[in-house]
Image (spheres, grey):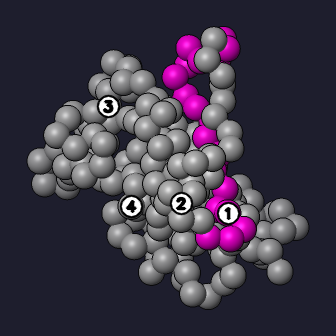
Amino acid sequence: MKHYVFTDLSSHFLRTARERFADEPWVHKMSFATVDITAPLADQLGGAEHDGYDVVLAATMAHNSIDVDALLREVGVLLAPGGVVVLIETIVEHAQSLTTMPFALSMPDGSGPPARTDVRAGSHRTYLTAHEWTAAMVRAGLRPCVDLPRNGHPLEAFSQRLLVAARPDTPTTHAETHDR
């Protein structure tokens, strides 16, 4: 039986989702969970209790991870063979989003965003470029298959990308992934 897990970092949006989907005929196949992407995902989502996720969708949140390589490796483990991770991510540092994002990511003690340990380490960057996202997917053992909008497309001006990567049906080595 297919099952959908709706996650967020706050209970507010989970409550909103429960209300929104309450009358849907498939709601009995849905569960709701708060997820902290700085903690092991499998521990929070019961990774051993299922055969893997067919799709993991993360809209404008994966950049909040302190290490996107580690996050994508964890997601790769949670995916079923052939499963996909779908990311919608901002890829350009814009003044409009940066006026609020560092505050939203700040630690509860007010010390600012946590130090990054990925390609953003030692910088004040919030977002990864599209190339950095696809490279992180490859390092995580995933096969990038979608990066939209294409360069030159009018939607490129919005600086958001749809990035999709698949977990191979069979494991590949790090070297094999780079040869493709």
Label 4: which secondary element: helix
Q: Mark 2, residues whose alpha carbon is within 10 Å: few (<14), some, or many (≥20)?
A: many
Label 2: which secondary element: loop
Q: Which residue is mark 4?
A: 70
Q: Which residue is mark 2?
A: 141
In the picture, residue 97 is in which quadrant? top left
**Amino acid found under the numbered disc labelled 2:** Gly
- Image: 84 above or below 150: below
Assess whether mark 4 and mark 1 are in contact (beta carbons under 8 angstroms): no
Q: Which residue is mark 3?
A: 100
Judge depth for marks 1 and 3 and give the one in front: 1
Q: Which residues are magenta?
A: 153-171
User: Which quarter of the rendered picture does the N terminus lie within?
Assistant: bottom right
Residue drawn at x 38%, y 35% is 127
Residue 126 within the magenta-colored segment of the rendering: no
Q: Position of residue 131 (x, y in %)?
A: 48, 33
Q: Position of residue 59 (x, y in %)?
A: 56, 45
Of labels 2 and 4, earlier in sequence is 4
Measure the C-alpha gap from mark 2 to mark 1: 8 Å
Assess whether mark 4 and mark 3 are in contact (beta carbons under 8 angstroms): no
Judge depth for marks 3 and 2 and give the one in front: 2
Residue drawn at x 30%, y 42% is 119
167 or 12: nearer the eye? 167
Assess whether mark 2 and mark 3 are in contact (beta carbons under 8 angstroms): no
63 or 180: nearer the eye? 180
**Amino acid found under the numbered disc labelled 1:** Pro
Q: Position of residue 46 (x, y in %)?
A: 54, 83
Is 47 on the left or on the right of 168, as rendered?
left
Measure the C-alpha gap from mark 3 to mark 4: 25 Å
Measure the C-alpha gap from mark 1 to mark 4: 18 Å
Label 1: which secondary element: loop
131 or 71: nearer the eye? 131
